[in-house]
Image (cartoon, rainbow, N blue to C red):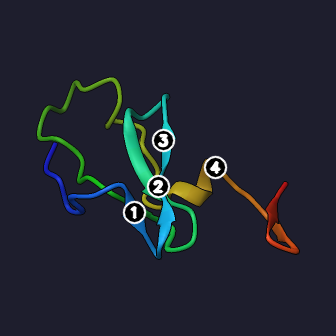
Amino acid sequence: MTNLKMNNLCCQLPRSYSEEYDCYFCKSCNTWSESKCDDINCEYCINRPVFPNDYHPFQVNKGVES
């Protein structure tokens, strides 16, 4: 996978990690930190949604994730 963001921060917040897709993502930006790999049989990338929040939905209530 290609790194698009080289540090652990995005939007001045720590990135989250998806074990299912083996990839970091930013909840605020709703972007993956890495692109999908080129292996069409990759168990992590093959079903990864375009946007992380499509799979990892969250709501912010007074700064607390629920």
Q: Earlier in the sequence, mark 3 or mark 4?
A: 3
- The residue beneath circle 2 is 15
CA separation in Å, label 4 and label 2: 13 Å
Q: Which mark is residue 28?
A: none
The reply to whether the C-beta atoms of the residues labelled 2 and 3 are less than 8 Å apart is yes
The answer to which of marks 4 and 2 sits earlier in the sequence is: 2
Of badges 4 and 1, nearer the viewer stands 1
Residue designated by label 1: 9
Q: Amino acid at mark 3?
A: Tyr
Q: Is residue 22 left or right of residue 19?
A: left
Which residue is denoted by mark 4 in the rendering? Answer: 56
Q: CA distance from mark 3 to mark 1?
A: 12 Å
Per the image, label 1 sits on a secondary structure element best described as strand
Tag 4 and tag 2, C-beta contact below 8 Å: no
Q: Are marks 2 and 1 in contact (CB under 8 Å)?
A: yes
- Mark 2 residue crowding within 10 angstroms, few (<14) / some (14–19) / many (20+): some
- The mark that comes first in sequence, 4 or 1, is 1
Residue at x-position 20% and y-position 62%: 4
Under mark 2, the amino acid is Arg
